[in-house]
Image: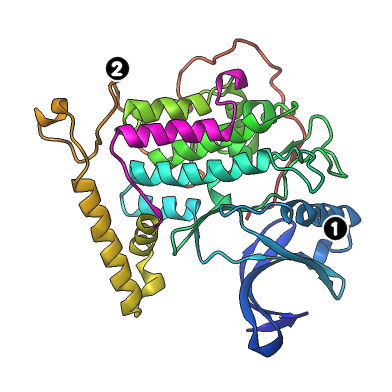
Amino acid sequence: MVTTFGRYQLIERIGIGGMAEVFRATQRGAAGFERAVAIKRILPQIAADPQVVAMFVEEAKLAVQLAHPNIAQVFDLGEVDGSYFIAMEYVDGHSAETLIQRLVEQGRRLPFDAVCHILCEVAEALHYAHFAEDSAGRPLGIIHRDVSPQNILLSFGGEVKVIDFGLAKAANRLSQTQDGIVKGKLAYLSPEQAHGKTIDRRSDVFALGICAWEMLTGRRAFKRDDDRETVLAVRAGRVERVGEHVPVPPALDLVVMRALAKNRDKRYRTALEMKEHLTRFARTAGLRFERSDLRALMRETFPERFRGEPVADAIALVTRKKAERRRKRRPVSPAKKAKAPSTDTVVEPAVPLVRRRPPSREQHAWDDAETDPGTAPPEDAGHDEDTVPTIVLPEDR
């Protein structure tokens, strides 16, 4: 049922978390002006909490300063009948998490070219945010701190948008995080974040590495049966190479594992550096994936969204055939011509092959089931106390 909310019409609730709920809405204006937006509104039961309101207002003030094609734009901050809200860009599509779940259900995985494309777009957004400045040219010092498949939106038009800078830490924020307090989705924390230590932009790089690992494998990297075990798994920072679970070009595996280095000094220094290595891999492997290809993938994977729309179905078919033709035109190295190529592999750069062994247990579904942390030794020795810091769980969007 459509509800009037100030100058907006709330059409349906599309999400709810611990602090706020999100609605698909319409903004109306003079002369028949109309725009689709997403309204994020503080939950009624906590709207009277001044700390919650302050955090909510800070989120809006921070996000409105970010203007990038891969970051969902914030349009407005307001109050209606004592209820604070944020009006933001509405992305017609699904999260990367939902896409991974659907593909797992279909017995499929994201192709390498799609993974590289999505990661590069997210890396662009993070690099922009990390080095963003205010109107006076002062660095904002933003760290997202909540990079996860849930916060990567993929539109049916082929766009990639990073959302929810609500947990972002900026140098000029009013309410600074207390020492020892952990914020962020627990399974996507960096090791230093899980210890409650000071973090920098490389923490977001680690989280992006987790996203890459999960996109390629269709499994959870650090999620365990309970919060404590999840935090301890992240602290240990041990995860098997992607190639131990699924066939993957070694060069791509190396990019992911460098992002997942427990020692942050061994990670990529910036998200842009990670993007450059992904781009180099894709170019060497002859991979090409564009916005139109993501559009076709989304429409093919979620056909129910376009059922009964012949024009949209025709567009999806055409773009999918274009992508297939492009893949057939990829160059094949002389070494590959000597034998029939596998349907699960792509042209790989000249790097040493990694002997792969089957995982020690059956593949886990994309849910909260326990996953194998692997047996790789940590990069830096050390025996931290077996304790978990005070954990502030973010809203589960």
Numbered range of the magenta stretch: 263-291
The residue nearer to you, when weighing 31 against 107, is 31
Kindly state the secondary structure of the residue where label 1 is placed.
helix
Q: Position of residue 6 (x, y in %)?
A: 78, 79
Q: Is residue 364 magenta?
A: no
Q: Farthest residue toward the bottom?
A: 31
Q: Farthest residue toward the top?
A: 381
Q: Which mark is residue 321?
A: none
Q: Main secondary structure of the magenta part?
A: helix
Q: Is residue 109 left or right of residue 266?
A: left
Q: Which mark is residue 352?
A: 2
**For marks 2 and 1 on the same chain, the one whose residue lies earlier in the sequence:** 1
Q: Farthest residue toward the front?
A: 136
Name the image quarter holding the C terminus.
bottom right
Give the residue type at disc 1: Val
**Residue at position x 30%, y 23% in the image:** 357
Q: Position of residue 287 (x, y in %)?
A: 31, 41
Question: CA–CA distance between discs 2 and 1?
Answer: 54 Å
**Residue at position x 31%, y 20% in the image:** 351
